[in-house]
Amino acid sequence: MEKDKLMNLSYDAEADVLYLSIGEPRPAISREIGEDILLRLDPTTGAVVGLTIFNLAAHRDLSALPLQIDLRELAS
């Protein structure tokens, strides 16, 4: 599998933040898609490159997180 297609997860227990990167972590712009959730986008192409979830412990039911989004809405 290509390295830029691998998903990397990192959890900072002290800050209670989950970082998910598609490929190696890289500079990106963030769009808030829900409370405590940032979608990370490549600033040039607009491609999704990651996701950051703050206060992960407070989200006991991860299925309730708003992870189904229309990426076309983020283009603006």
Image (cartoon, rainbow, N blue to C red):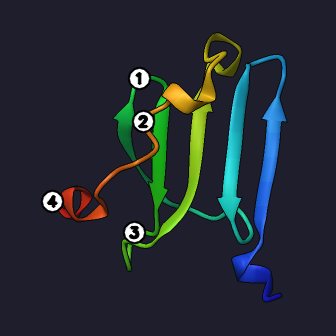
Q: Earlier in the sequence, mark 3 or mark 2?
A: 3
The circle on residue 43 is 3
Q: CA distance from mark 3 to mark 2?
A: 22 Å
> Which residue is found at the position 34% from the left and 51% from the top?
69
Closer to viewer: mark 3 or mark 2: 2
The circle on residue 35 is 1
How far across and down, in percent of the image, does residue 3 sit? 80, 82
* Secondary structure type for disc 1: loop
* Secondary structure type for disc 4: loop
State the residue in front, 43 or 7: 7
The circle on residue 66 is 2
Structural crowding at the residue carrying mark 4, measured as other residues with C-alpha within 10 Å and reported as few (<14), some (14–19) or many (≥20) = few
- Tell me, yes or no, whether the two marked residues, 2 and 1, touch with CB atoms within 8 Å: no
Q: CA distance from mark 4 to mark 2?
A: 19 Å
- Tell me, yes or no, whether the two marked residues, 3 and 4, touch with CB atoms within 8 Å: no
Q: Is residue 43 left or right of residue 28?
A: left
> Which residue is found at the position 68% from the left and 58% from the top?
21
Closer to viewer: mark 3 or mark 4: 4
